[in-house]
Image (cartoon, rainbow, N blue to C red):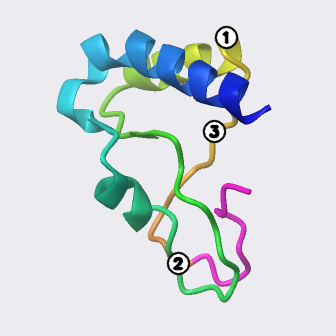
Amino acid sequence: APAQHHDAAQRCHDMLAPLLGDRLLTSASARAQYAQSESYHHAPAPDLVAKPTSIDDVQAIVRAAATHRLPIIGWGAGTSLEGNAAAT
C-alpha cells in the first residue's frame, strides 16, 4: 500500500537523518537525479538517497532499510544501460 510505504520511508528518514545529515537527500530534484540513467527504462525517483562515507554509515543504512522493509538500490556511475539500478 502506498501510504504504508510512505510512512516506512519517513521512519527510515527519521532514523538516518541524525547520522547522515545533508548526506541524506530528500528533495525532489536531488532524488530525480538518481532516477535517470543511460537506459531507455523509466524509473521512479527513490524515496531517499543516502550517501555513506564509512562502513558505519552503510551498516546504519542497511539496518534502517531492513527494519522498515525498504529496498536498497546500489548506485554507481549512473549508466545502467540494462536498467539494473532502476528502483522499480
Q: Secondary structure at mark 1?
A: helix
Q: Residue furthest front?
A: 3
Is residue 70 visible in this depiction of the protein? Answer: no
Name the residue: 45% across, 61% down: 34
Label of residue 25 in the image: none
Residue under label 3 = 72
Tell me the magenta residue range: 80-88
Percent position (x, y) of residue 42?
A: 66, 76
* Picture quadrant of residue 6: top right
Q: Looking at the picture, which amino acid does disc 1 mark?
A: Thr
Percent position (x, y) of residue 25?
A: 32, 41
Label of residue 37 in the image: 2
Q: Residues within 10 Å of mark 3 (few under 14, many from 20)?
A: some
Is 67 placed above or below 87 here?
Answer: above
Residue under label 1 = 67
Q: Is 24 on the left or on the right of 32, as rendered? A: left
